[in-house]
Amino acid sequence: MRFFITDDDPAVRRMLAQLIEDEDLGEVAGEAADGADVDAGLLAVTRTDIWLIDLLMPKRDGIETVREIAPSFPGKIIMLSQVESKEMIGEAYALGVEYYITKPINRLEVLSVIRKVEERMRLARSIQNIRQSLLGLDDGGLGQPPAPRERDRGSDGIGAAGRYLFSELGITGEIGCKDLLVMLQILLEHDDAASGQRDFPQLRELFRAAAVRKLGDKADEAVIKKEIKAAEQRVRRTIHQALSHLASLGLTDYSNIKFENYASKFFDFTEVRKRMLELEDESGDTVSQVRINVKKFIQVLYLEAKQHMREH
């Protein structure tokens, strides 16, 4: 089973992820700190089976988020909350929430609920398999399986892959992610136009293309330059947050799979190590001394996103 956890409390997210891992229930496909950071595309690209979501969050609460996403989410939803209002619980169930867990989190209750949900999912799949077998008998077993759906290579495909990677890197919801998504789309178009050639555009050209796409090609040159400068700052801050997230994972567990998979791909490892030392030294300078290679990060992000599109 693949789980996605949405909760504004990082301690709760860590506890649930640790529980899922310790009890061998499956894997955590992604995390988000607010309902505003989750959409149906993200849950689809992470292939989420069970979605654990908090009721009360600062930007968009669990009820509103589930109301928007549940109609297109085929998995199961478990809601978490300290609120025990019968009206709210009733509304959550009406929207398609499978179970409701009250906070503070109780390990045994969480295990019991997840196992009940898994059992219901297995039962539903068994029933579906029986129905498909019966349909095959009805047409003499000659029915052909439907042709596999052609995967979207357009903006939705690269965007979903990008959002998946943002979740993996711990930067979902960072303001610079919007700029990076635009750049991924521009790079995909550039790749197609170049017939697969690997010439990566200059960073300044990429930021300019993103600014023009946002403002329109008739925008004043001074306005475009101002947007480019602002975008560079947003992207740099977002990349620094990704570095800090991976460094913190490495400090907690050097063999963490995300740390192993992404740290040396997206960053020079000397800079990762430097950031780890900064995080260890809580009394150190508040301004980080690590160097961010923006071009390398965007190149790797694009190549990883394309790889994810091919595999999923």
Image: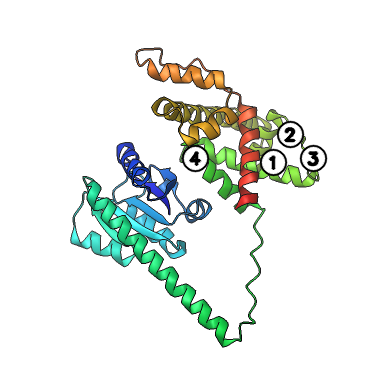
Residue at image coords 64%, 45%: 307
Q: Residues within 10 Å of mark 2 (few under 14, many from 20)?
A: few
Query: In this orientation, does residue 96 appear?
Result: no
**Residue 200, labelled with which disc?**
2
Cα distance between the residues tagged 3 and 1:
11 Å
Judge from the rendering whether residue 105 lies leftward or rightward of residue 203; answer left or right. left
Number of marks: 4
| Residue type, label 4 | Glu
Quarter where residue 250 is shown: top left
Q: Residues within 10 Å of mark 1 (few under 14, many from 20)?
A: many
Image position of 221 with respect to 48: above or below: above
Cα distance between the residues tagged 2 and 4:
24 Å
Cα distance between the residues tagged 4 and 3:
28 Å
Residue 206 image point, x, y percent: 68, 34
Numbered disc 2: secondary structure: loop
**Residue 197, labelled with which disc?**
3
Q: Is disc 1 in contact with disc 2, using a CB cutoff of under 8 Å?
A: yes
Cα distance between the residues tagged 1 and 2:
8 Å
Q: Which residue is mark 1?
A: 187
